[in-house]
Amino acid sequence: MARQTEIQSEKRAMRAAIRASIAALVPEDSRVWSGTAASKLYSRLAGAKRVMLYWPLGTAVRGAPVAEVDLRALVSSLIGNGVEVSLPRTDWVTGEVEPRMVRQVPLDLAVGRFGVSEPVDRCPAPRLPPEIVIAPGLAFDLSGGRLGRGAGFYDRFVGNLRRNPLGTVRVIGVCFGMQLVDRVPREATDELMDEVWTEAGKVSERGSGDGKPIAAGA
């Protein structure tokens, strides 16, 4: 219990530090880095059948966001390429995340709790789980560690997907390069990313054998 309390304290301190760094970002840097990351991710995702992405925080309130990599253009590009694209819809009472298919963005979205844009009721759940999930986060490390915003929604969602017998999922963490850290504090319930991408491309990939990161530099 003492160790778990220590880890939670480390997470709070890291969240505060990363949020301060993000708040100091120049909006133009965020825009350029997002465009570069989206372009590189497109080549990774264009051949997939089912991908779950995310709609960036703050777009309904403040315009172009700087809090996380803006992949809105990538969502539209993949839909146009025939990829089945879903976005997360959150039950804020149970903390469950459910993918819902979108075909026309932003028409298929509505602003929900905390200003988060989510798929509307008419958007159907996919018949099969996504092959690839793109996960945002406050910080990542090269071993696949991810620091979320503290609610554990993505960890539970990814854990359930990985236990789903209907298919296998590849989880890709996406962030700005300045959000990479030496080590993300981890608890037993924290899910590791299979790959981590920034505006530099793929910066790490967990090996299928020893679980250690493979230098990628794509």
Image (cartoon, grey):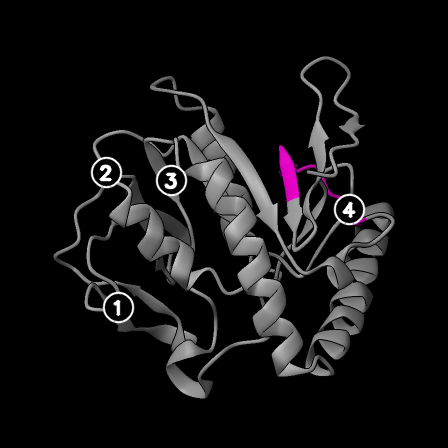
Question: Which residue is pictured at 39% across the width and 71% down the height?
Answer: 116
- Residue 93 lies in the magenta-colored region: no
> What residue is at 48 percent from the left and 79 percent from the top?
64
- Label 4: state its secondary structure: loop
Magenta range: 184-196
Query: Which residue bears the numbered disc 4?
Result: 141
- Looking at the image, is mark 4 or mark 2 earlier in the sequence? 2
- The residue that appears at 72% across and 12% down in the rendered structure is 209
Task: Decide whether the magenta segment is chiefly helix, strand or loop.
Answer: loop
Q: Position of residue 133 (x, y in %)?
A: 46, 41
Which label number is shown at residue 4? none
Dot 2 corresponds to which residue?
126
Query: Which kind of residue does numbered mark 2 sit on?
Result: Pro
Dots 3, 4 in contact, CB < 8 A: no
Q: Earlier in the sequence, mark 3 or mark 1?
A: 3
Marks 1 and 2, the one that precedes in the sequence: 1
Cα distance between the residues tagged 2 and 3: 10 Å
Q: Work out whether 49 lies above or below 31.
A: above
Residue type (three-letter) at the residue carrying disc 3: Val
Which mark sits nearer the N-terminus, 2 or 3?
A: 3
Are the two marked residues, 4 and 1, in contact with CB atoms closer than 8 angstroms?
Answer: no
Mark 4 is on which residue type? Asp
